[in-house]
Structure formats: C-alpha cells, structure tokens
Amino acid sequence: MSAVKKAVVVERLRKAQIVEFLSKGKRLDGRGLLDFRPIKIETGIIEKANGSARVQIGNTQVIAGVKIEIGEPFPDTPEMGLLVVNVEVLPLSSAYAEPGPPDEEAIELARVVDRGIRESKMVDLSKLVLISGKKVHALFVDVDILDTDGNLFDAASYATVASIATSTMPKSSVGQDGQIKQEDESIPLQINCIPISITLAKIDSEFIVDPTSEEEAVMDARITFTFDDDGKIRAGQKGQPGTLDFNQVKLAVEIAKAKAKEIREIIKKSIKDAKG
C-alpha cells in the first residue's frame, strides 16, 4: 500500500472515531461539543509596541503587536484612519508550515480578523484623522502564529482585539502652522466594543467550537462569526471545505452567539486587569 493510500485510510479511521465520540456528546480530548480549551491571555508583552498580547487556546499560541504611526489615508477613504492586519505563520509553528510569503490560508486569516474588527467599529477610524485627506493615525497589527493546534481564526482575533484594546498612542495635535506635534504623553486608544470571533466546525451532523488541528483535518465545513457587544453579527466567513444549508447556518449562529457572550467576559477581564 502506498504512503498516500495509508494516509487516506488513517484519516478515514480517525474521522470514524471522532464521529463516534461526537455522537455521544464527547470529543477525543474529553471536552463537550461546545467547550473551549483553556484560554490564557497576556497583554503588554512587547515593550516597544503600542499594544501587544499573547493568546493561548490549548496548544495553539498566537502573539499580536500594534504599532501606531502617522501616515496618509487611503485615496478612497480620506476621512478615515488606517487599520491594517497582517498574519504570519512562523515555520516552527507546525510541521506543515513553510517559510516564504503568506499563503492563501494566512491571507484569509488576516482578512477575517481584520473584517471582524473593522465591521464591528471597535475603533472609530474617523477619529484618527489629523488633517483631512492628508494625515491620519495608522494602526498596524502584526500577528505571528507561534504554535498551531487548530482554531487559528479565534486565537488570532482574540490576540488582535486584546492588543488593540490595551494600546496607547502619543498625544498628537495640529498646530496653527499645519504641522503635527506629538507630545511625550501617551493616551489610551479609544475603543467602542470588544468584538468576539467564534469559529465552528461541522463534522458529520454535529457542530463543535474551538476545533483542534485533528478535528479540522476531518471537518466537513467551517464557519466563523464575529459579534459586537450587543450580540449582533458584524462579520462572517464560510471557509473551505463543504457547504451548509440555511437551517445549519441558523443553528451555527445560535451556538456562536451564546459562546461569544461567554468568551467576551474572559477577554474583558484580561483587558481590565491590564489597565489596572
């Protein structure tokens, strides 16, 4: 039997085992279908960053750093500051990660995280404008995947949210001469909400939250939602593989909305502790 055929057989056997456990309301690691692994959030871990956070969900580990600079607005949004999220999956994070430019999965990951934060209006980008059409504050968020064991979408989002929520920025003003002046004093970056991402994987007929790498390898579909403080959906992403019908999406929303409320309290506590 070739190595490829062996891999297929092993994957099918593993999926059968996972499905059998799920039918009994359990998972291979002992969790219930709607249980997250332990979540650990540390903030202020990068001294030179305006804000930073490390998030661990089980064995998945992600670090995010925020740099706030003065730049020029995009031509099509002259009255808005900038928010740019970049994600890099470090080669040592997984046996399958390779060095080089971001692949499609890393690009999708960055876009989903960016969209959830942007559409939730966590930061009012219009308040970052210094000189209309010319100078604005720009938020650059760099996310590094340190260890991969599933659910990178939520881990990257939580690290980004925590780093932004604990960011400070130089106090800036525009003088009568039109020049921008930055003072030594730093002020907190103003935020409007704590967006929460919840990713669900569908395996056979069951939905689970916080899938591990092993579960992701055999999942039939994946979907991610981001909710604002009021529990409203601000962004969604249906990932590969598989499809979901209307009733399945509706069920996924109900599960994710309830879970987001729970996770928000964990993140809010870490932010509150960081701010003292």
Image (cartoon, rainbow, N blue to C red):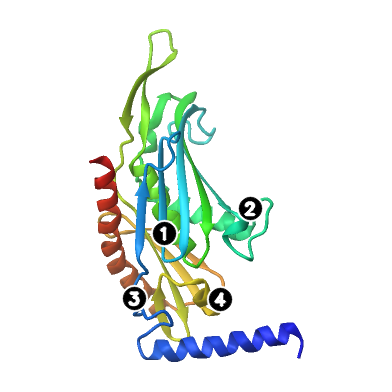
In the image, which disc is placed on residue 102?
Answer: 2
Categorize mark 1 by other alpha carbons within 10 Å: few (<14), some (14-19), many (20+): many
Type of residue at label 2?
Answer: Pro
How many residues crowd mark 4 within 10 Å: few (<14), some (14–19), many (20+)? few
Q: Which residue is mark 4?
A: 217
The first of marks 1 and 4 along the sequence is 1
Q: Which residue is mark 3?
A: 34
Question: Is the residue under label 3 in contact with that under label 2 (CB below 8 Å)?
Answer: no
Closest to the observer, 214 or 177: 214
For badge 1, the amino acid type reads Gln
First of labels 1, 3 by sequence position: 3
Q: Which amino acid type corresponds to the residue marked 3 in the rendered image?
A: Leu
Residue at 46 percent of width and 42 percent of height: 65
Crowdedness near tag 2: few (<14), some (14–19) or many (≥20) residues, C-alpha within 10 Å: some
Q: Horizontal placement of 269 versus 31: left or right?
A: left
Residue at mark 1:
56
What is the C-alpha distance between the residues marked 3 and 4?
A: 18 Å
